Image: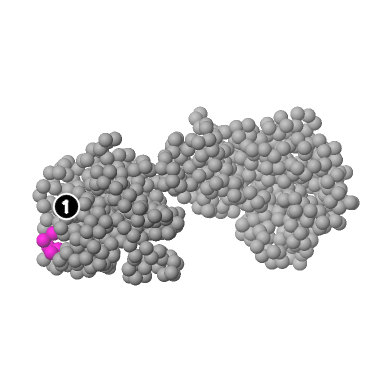
Amino acid sequence: MTSSKIQQFTNCKILRNGHLIDEHLWVRGGTIIDPEKVFFDEKIKANLVIDCKGCIISPGFIDIQINGGFGIDFSNILDNIEERVDCVSKSLLKYGVTSFCPTIVTSPVQVYQNVLKRIKKRRGGAKGATILGVHVEGPFINIDKKGAHPPEYIKNFDSGFQTLLETYGSLENVNIVTLAPELHGSDEVIKQLNALQIRVSVGHSMANLKDGEKAVFNGANLITHLFNAMLPFHHRDPGLVGLLTSNNIPKDKTIYFGIISDGIHTHPSALRIAYRTHPDGLILITDGISAMGLEEGKHNIGQLSIEIRNGTAFIVGTNTLCGSIATMDQCVRLFRETTGCSKEFALEAATLHPAAALGISAVKGTLNFGGDADFLFLDEDLNVLSTWIAGECVYTTSNKC
Amino acid sequence: MRLVILDTSSCVAEWAAKYVLKRINDFKPGPNNYFVLGLPTGSTPYGMYQTLIEYYKAGKVSFKYVKTFNMDEYVSLPRDHPESYHFYMWNNFFKHIDIEPKNVHILNGNASDLVEECNNYENEIAKAGGIELFIGGIGPDGHIAFNEPGSSLVSRTRVKTLAQDTLEANARFFGNDISKVPHQALTVGVGTVMDAKEVMILITGTHKSFALYKAIEEGVNHMWTVSAFQQHPHTLFICDEDATLELKVKTVKYFKALSAVHHKLIEDEIPIEQSRIIH
């Protein structure tokens, strides 16, 4: 397809400004365009009219926390790193994910040094979903909230930001850093990361609300898998959960939070609490592990072994949860069922919200003019019918795109 | 002149749409034979456009060989402003149908030389072979297009300063701030519309009833510019019951008695030329 060709998607309901509207979607050169300008200025029509048969068109899903999948664990790849990451990014298309942040859990320094430089930010296409940058979850976390992270590699900011740089090696491919804000030296680290346009997400933490609010003032704008690996809500110190309703953060700032809606990691009632108290900040994440897309049995996550029993992943021999194996499209559907929210909201929680949290909503996560033409055809129950990146069909359940 | 009186405004929309459909299809437009349509904007024709879109989607009519000329546009209003007539036409009609963009003509209120823009518009109409059917609405003061009261009845396309009444009426579309209402517009002239082979004027609602009375029961008068069409050989007024409130009972009865004849105009099987012979 040459870049000057115009595609016009008709007979569809598109998600725009929070509403599913009867509107055509026009695409040229991988970008969503304003057909009014084409009509009146260029006086031309679309080269290709595509009948969408009444389906929903949503922006493509953006997963900002995914540890791997399809037998591959981003934190535990020894060789052929690029190839394996490609394999995951391609396999994700089926689940409607058009952009993602490969997530690396607490790991030895050599893993960061080896892997981080090889998982490059890159545009998506037929070869797979866009890689927005790596989400490094740890190692600067609180050992008391380690979750499934190996405790021996957890670190403090002994030399402040310098420790972080020495640990990760390069920040070039890093997009999000999850850290515990109560760690000594985190104030300076958060400010530095913020200055580098790297998002800071607070999590795996024993922080009280004050620590959380300070982190937000320093530049953090995300909470990692809300409710998981943090202090439980307490009415006299609501902890990081309290950030959802805090009035002691900058007025113009939205706090975003990842939440796993796989029906296991977050109780349906807890999902509803999060949804009703702070819907604007809600981001659906899979926190998917290597076993996502695989059958029951033993698998590896980071330096640990895990086991899938009855569709749930545990650390081998324990009942500690270590990540979800629900896919993004399942999370969207489950979230909608659980909360009774609108289709529009469920979709925006997997599209607009993560894009806004990362500051890329001008090009990703919406179907607005000028944005990247990454989108999905969905049926009324939000099952993925096809996935499109830059206006190109990269996955479909039917034979034709 | 014919006056078709229908029950409601939605009947007016449907009747007008049927008439446009029939006129286009009877014309048998093709690559060497374009049907040229003059078009209005506003709330009155909205229902007609909706119905035409339905007909298009049902495969009853195509606009592939139709050329359109819109009546008017505000001066210096951004084209993508929700009150611009470009915006109206795109969103309420053009984007839904198969018309070729190059066959669409709307005056450019942002042109650097407005006079030249108006003169070119007249030339474009002439080049298209004149307008076959000009559809219009009217204001409560009897204006057609932006030919405000006092406009010359032989006027051509030009820049027009809007009457205070019009500014006040339009302020509601601009956040009730009259200073934001464009005070000038480009508009086809009364003479431009008079040149069309046929003119169909839609009038609905009680607030237009006095204008309808002035249009058809009193003499030709430039203070009620739509009255000029009394002198057009093929004028159709389509109105609802509400719009007849200021008419004489005699007038209403006369035209209602003719309604069977008028309804033949939109019947499928009778060629338009045949039903048109009888006035």
Which structural element holds mark 1? loop
Q: Residue at x 51, y 39 (%)?
A: A28
Q: Nearer the viewer, residue A27 or A103?
A: A27
* Residue A175 visible in the shown view: yes
The answer to which quarter of the image holds residue B118 is bottom left
Q: Residue at x 56, y 48 (%)?
A: A366
Q: Residue at x 77, y 62 (%)?
A: A214
Q: Nearer the viewer, residue A296 or A124?
A: A124
Whether residue B254 is in magenta: the answer is yes
Query: On the rendered image, what quadrant is the N terminus of chain B found in?
Result: bottom left
x then y, percent, for residue A349: 61, 50
Q: Which residue is identified by label 1? A: B234
x then y, percent, for residue A77: 78, 33
Bounds of the magenta segment: B251-256
Q: Residue at x 53, y 49 (%)?
A: A368
The answer to which quarter of the image holds residue B271 is top left
x then y, percent, for residue B23: 22, 45
Relative to residue A37, is residue B155 drawn left or right?
left
As drawn, A93 above or below A371: above
Number of other residues with Cα within 10 Å of mark 1, as a class: few under 14, some 14 to 19, many 20 or more:
some
Relative to residue A283, is residue B18 drawn left or right?
left
Chain that bears disc 1: B
